Amino acid sequence: MAQAPDVTPDATPDVTPGFAPERAPGFFTPVPDVFVRTHMGVPDVDADRWTLSVEGLVERPLRIGLAELLARPARRLAAVHECFGSPFAPDVPTRAVANVAWTGFPLAELLDEARPLAQARHVWFEGVDTGSFHGEDGLTYTKDLPLKDAHGRVFLAHRMNGEPLTAEHGSPVRAVVPRMFGTNSVKWLTRVVLAARRPEHMFTTRFYTRVLPGADAPTPVRDVDVNSKLSAPADGARLPVGDVEITGHAWSTTEVAAVEVSVDEGPWERAALDALGADDGPVWQRFTLTRPLTAGPHRVRSRATDRTGRVQPPPGSRNSVHEITVTAEVP
Ligand SMILES: Nc1nc2c(c(=O)[nH]1)N[C@H]1C(S)=C(S)[C@@H](COP(=O)(O)O)O[C@H]1N2
Ligand SMILES: [Mo]
């Protein structure tokens, strides 16, 4: 089995204001600023009747109520959270991204208690939400992962930045799959099914697949791409002429090794980049570069390179170089 997710014991699950105060402002994304994505609306979940089951190809099927689940020792997983974008437009950048501290525990604990049978190869994750999508009725939001990834990477979260999950973010319990696109992090999780094969489904085999560079067949949308996002100044901002601190965040499946920034047609210049700390989970990394800006509009671009040598591509891909425009003015 793969190694358990990179999680730290959570001693203070109730502390939200100033959560991780040693971090620069904006390092964690406040809950109201985290994007919300639903395919079939937000379901009305009755927390008193909600259960989570682990079933299918297991020796000991489990069914757990919320009180029992919340009583388990809590851990924390800080991780970048990124939406892949529209399943109909896999090459369009959206840069819907956040950095979140989740509280919960690794799915591996439940899988170990349920004892997968030898034939179990895949884990299906089902949400409470059902409905229609793209002309098909009677759907349940379903995703799947190889058992090795489900065991090694999936975290079951019931708090987000220290607060109980809100309805739109998957209350009472959701999956979080660090370093995979958000589509895999099933909200309102209610069933975990171990199976010998993948589920044939709208959101597993029909949409959310893509052909990776250098490949000839589509694969499921899972691992995130190397990417960066300029956060300040904001796109379209007007600022006084003179030195401006350009900041943003970068992330990938591994640590990001370098971020370069270019102003107008100038060269790519290496920004200062925070390394991933020894205690950090798969969080995003902040970068900064200070540049003097003359009066007028300026084009600012950021480009990340990760430890495996992957570099953000030019425009045309969902993770292309990020570009904003700002205007400097004489006060
Ligand atoms: N049950 C369920 N889980 C879901 C979805 C959904 O529609 N239903 N949307 C997915 C997508 S595409 C993304 S990007 C993330 C978004 O999580 P958030 O809304 O908490 O940011 O949830 C994922 N999990
Ligand atoms: Mo998404």
Image (cartoon, rainbow, N blue to C red):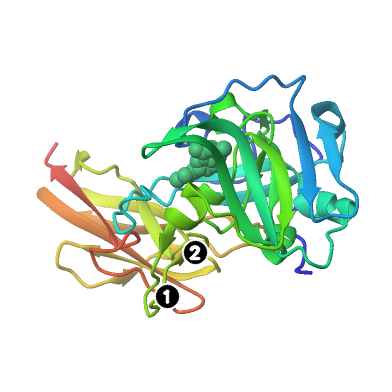
Rendered image: mark on residue 252: 2
Dot placed on the residue nearer the N-terminal end, 1 or 2: 2
Q: Quadrant of residue 267?
A: bottom left
Residue situated in front as seen by the camera: 140 or 304: 140
- The answer to whether residue 256 is above or below residue 71 is below
The amino acid sitting under disc 1 is Arg
Rendered image: mark on residue 42: none
* Residue sitting at x 78%, y 66%: 119
* Residue sitting at x 86%, y 42%: 62
- Specify whether 68 is left or right of 187: right
According to the image, label 1 marks what residue?
310
* Residue sitting at x 87%, y 51%: 114
Q: Position of residue 245 (x, y in %)?
A: 33, 51
Instruction: Give the position of the N terminus as an image quadrant.
Output: bottom right
Q: CA distance from mark 1 to mark 2?
A: 9 Å
The amino acid sitting under disc 2 is Ser
- Specify whether 29 is left or right of 59: left
Q: Is residue 82 visible?
A: no
Q: Position of residue 133 (x, y in %)?
A: 41, 37
- Specify whether 319 is left or right of 82: left
Instruction: Give the position of the C terminus as an image quadrant.
Output: top left
